[in-house]
């Protein structure tokens, strides 16, 4: 039986019209927002679920977050950074390098461990404080080909303004991190490990570059979620720590960081998956006895409570 309907010619031109209209609609309404002025020029596929381009850039970033007891900050960090880096079309994974031993916090050793655990499938790292959020979308997290890229530049960081500062957020490619043998493992407690790393970079003649043409300043480029009374810095100095951590360390680094990976877990925060590396660091107490230190921390700066009041 012959079906009633339009002629084949009419049907074909109808189809052509519909597909033309669909193409126009896609071109007009599915263009992703331009939130970043970075130089990302590779061709990418369009992800219609996320309404953005999929990264096809071959580089892969491991965001290494040295971590202990900063859960509130992490709850904000993970969803925020996921959105921020997706908007920049970066291929990335977030690793929370969680120190589970009972020694003092050792940010640099945790970064070394994070690097060793991820270097097989990532070709650059971001050493990233959990409490520092980039607010300006133009801080580029792309592959740092020619040398480390210091995102948390001293002229933009809310707290640290000296010219050789490389803490907070620093991007380093795999070859360069290996070239300088990673970071020193001598720095237990707060401070100086980033300054020592700067000397390593300098000695290796690696030039640190920083964001340029940024219209924001030290007050509004980053959010630093850090109340110094709530999150006290462990500035105590025990044994000969002060002397022993003054100079460039030629004994320790990536090649001899001692640790056990106690476990690895996935944690999903607001739909964002992060990997928790539970790391047990080892300490040679004959070499760095200050990995344990019972002295009060920031005692000079903490106000004593008034007697009789809670
Ligand atoms: N950190 C942590 N637990 C600690 C101390 C430090 O997780 O007990 C991590 C955290 O990622 C933090 C970073 O180390 O952002 C740097 O420490 P902190 O914020 O005290 O240094 P700041 O740059 O504010 O002086
Ligand atoms: Mn901080």
Image (cartoon, grey):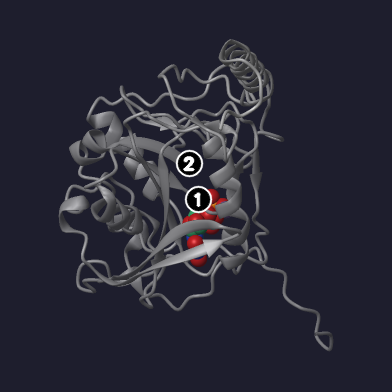
Say if 219 sits above or below 211 in the image: below
Residue for badge 1: 129
Image side of residue 111 versus residue 271, left or right: left
Q: Nearer the viewer, residue 45 or 135?
A: 45
Report the residue at 38% width, 30% height from top: 56
Q: Nearer the viewer, residue 259 or 283?
A: 259
Q: Nearer the viewer, residue 258 or 287?
A: 258
Say if 75 sits above or below 123 in the image: below
Distance between the alpha carbons at the discs numbered 1 and 2: 6 Å
Residue for badge 2: 169
Circle 1 packing at 10 Å, graded few (<14), some (14-19), many (20+), is: many
Q: Which mark is residue 114?
A: none
Residue 300 percent coordinates (x, y): 62, 65
Whether residue 253 is visible here, answered yes or no, is no
Disc 1 under 8 Å from ligand 1? The reply is yes
Quadrant occupied by the N terminus: top right
Report the residue at 60% width, 18% height from top: 15
Image side of residue 294 versus residue 130, left or right: left
| Residue placed furthest toward the right | 309
Report the residue at 66% width, 23% height from top: 5
Give yes or no for contact between labels 1 and 2 (Cβ–Cβ under 8 Å): yes
């Amino acid at each position: 039986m012959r079906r009633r309907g339009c002629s084949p010619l009419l049907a074909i031109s109808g189809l052509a019209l519909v597909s033309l209209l669909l193409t126009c609609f896609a071109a007009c309404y599915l263009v992703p927002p331009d939130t970043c002025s970075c130089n990302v020029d590779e061709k990418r596929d369009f992800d219609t679920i996320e309404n953005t381009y999929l990264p096809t850039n071959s580089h892969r970033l491991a965001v290494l977050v040295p971590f202990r007891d900063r859960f509130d900050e992490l709850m904000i960090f993970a969803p925020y950074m996921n959105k921020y880096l997706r908007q920049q079309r970066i291929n990335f994974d977030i690793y929370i390098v969680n120190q589970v031993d009972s020694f003092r916090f050792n940010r640099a050793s945790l970064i070394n461990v994070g690097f060793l655990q991820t270097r097989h499938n990532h070709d650059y790292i971001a050493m990233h404080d959990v409490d520092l959020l980039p607010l300006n979308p133009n801080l580029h997290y792309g592959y740092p080909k020619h040398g480390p890229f210091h995102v948390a530049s001293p002229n933009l960081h809310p707290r640290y303004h000296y010219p050789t500062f490389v803490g907070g957020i620093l991007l380093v490619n795999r070859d360069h991190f290996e070239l300088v043998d990673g970071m020193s493992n001598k720095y237990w407690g707060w401070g100086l490990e980033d300054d020592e790393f700067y000397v390593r970079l300098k000695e290796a003649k690696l030039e640190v570059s920083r964001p340029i043409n940024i219209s924001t300043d030290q007050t509004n480029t980053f959010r630093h979620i850090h109340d110094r009374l709530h999150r006290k810095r462990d500035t105590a100095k025990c044994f000969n720590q002060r002397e022993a951590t003054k100079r460039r360390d030629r004994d320790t680094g990536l090649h001899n960081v001692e640790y056990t990976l106690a476990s690895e877990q996935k944690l999903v925060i607001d739909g964002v998956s992060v990997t928790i590396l539970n790391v047990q660091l080892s300490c040679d107490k004959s070499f760095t006895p200050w990995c344990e230190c019972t002295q009060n921390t920031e005692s000079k700066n903490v106000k004593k409570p008034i007697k009789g009041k809670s």
